[in-house]
Amino acid sequence: MALHLDLTGLFGDGSDNRLTRDEFDAALPRAIAARETHLAAKPEWRGLGARDEFLAECQVRAAQVLEEQQPEALVVLGIGGSALGAQALLSALAPLYQQSEPAPGRPRVFVPDSVDPDWIGALLDHLPLDRCHVNVISKSGGTIATSAEFLVFYHAIRDAVGSEEEARKRFTITTDPEKGHFRKICDEQGFTTLTVPPGVGGRFSVLTSVGIFPAELAGMDVQSMLEGAARVDRKLDEVEPAADAALAYALAHVLYMERGKPIHVHFPYSQRARLLADWYAQLWAESLGKAEDLDGQVVHVGPTPVRAVGPTDQHSQCQLYVEGPDDKVYTLLKLGKFERELSVPTPFVDSPAFSHLAGKTFNELMEAERQGTEVALLEVGRPVCTIELCKLDAFHVGQYFLFMEAATAYAGGLLHIDPFDQPGVEAGKVAALALMGAPGYEKRAQEIRSSLAARTLFTLSC
């Protein structure tokens, strides 16, 4: 029942471009200092697995929705950290084809994390709007994409059910408990709300009501997910610093960044785990990509996360990984056990393409494919580590979430940046608000339009 980290493939003997154990050990005091700083100001998300108030409020609301509304569909409206956690959970833990065949007695779940008019319009046409429940997730209420989605779904559902009062019942708003635009609207209009803790940023919020409510409605074992996160949290606190797996992961990746390997490939060998890599990509990029360090010095630091899925991308990207630039570090995500076993039938014809498959399983083949990628990378001196989950269930997914969050925080400390802010994202939000005519942003809108008008454009048509 544990998450295992194997760093062996990250280290060489000095004959290639990989770290040596001596180099890693020499940097360990620096990592221990970053760990001590992190633990001294322990962020709120580190304790979420051991807290039950978010699960309790989500269970009460989910039971009410299921009993009173019996929804055929749940639509989760959010973007970035307000959507990626739910998407990762659905991919990993819900029935594989839950949008057509959900768990018994549970709604199909859709997470349209975009304002693409074709996607949103087609979804509105597809859904039984009079049998939908909508979970809107926005901590501040200032995310323009989520606000637009909320308005279009509210009007569509109001028209489908025939009244404002009935429409409001079909919405659950997950937002700040005291502040923000959505908090004011919910208090005035009587929408039911769930809590985003003020001290927990969006990309660290999957273990709050942000991830718990959709998971609870979809029928997942949320209690086990929280227990898995709590186990990792407790273990990371209890172990000696040199045995802290998340710290070792962070240190190795930061050292590789400093020696010219800023691209970090996250490579799950499980179709169900593919969206865990999407969740990781936001966590790693948004937390660690910063213009300034904690002293205000301009550093423009940060890794570039790349998502790959095995064995699919083994056949589409590994040519680059094995023979292209040596600027990457690879994390292979391995499952110790799949949910089912699928055997290869006896060949119907004698052929060297089939003979070696007789009596084998797809489970064995998946691991052979993963090991094949690992061997190919190691033989040319590329740094590879493996994270192994015993199996892909709620407990181990909770472990994965907390492990990667802790590693991200440690990496931020090692880079001497703030891993919990996102000024680059906020700049884009402000620009979008200005361009859409939001009150209070008139000056910024004029600046943007003047800048666009002054540009010399180089355009081509085909």
Image (spheres, rainbow, N blue to C red):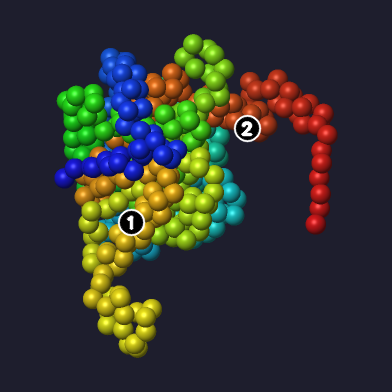
Q: Secondary structure at mark 2?
A: helix
Q: Residue at x 49, y 11 (%)?
A: 295
The local crowd at label 2, few if under 14, some if 14 to 19, many if 20 or more residues have their Cα within 10 Å, is some
Q: Is residue 325 visible?
A: yes
Eyeballing the image, is 65 above or below 445?
Answer: below
Q: Secondary structure at mark 1?
A: helix
Mark pair 1, 2: CA separation: 45 Å
Name the one closer to the observer, 76 or 70: 76
Q: Residue at x 74, y 24 (%)?
A: 446
Q: Mark 1 highlights which residue?
A: 371
Direction front: furthest residue: 15
* Residue 32 pos. (x, y %): 29, 20
- In the rendered image, the quadrant that contains the C terminus is bottom right
Name the one closer to the observer, 252 or 296: 252
* Residue 359 pos. (x, y %): 23, 76
Quarter holding residue 103: bottom left
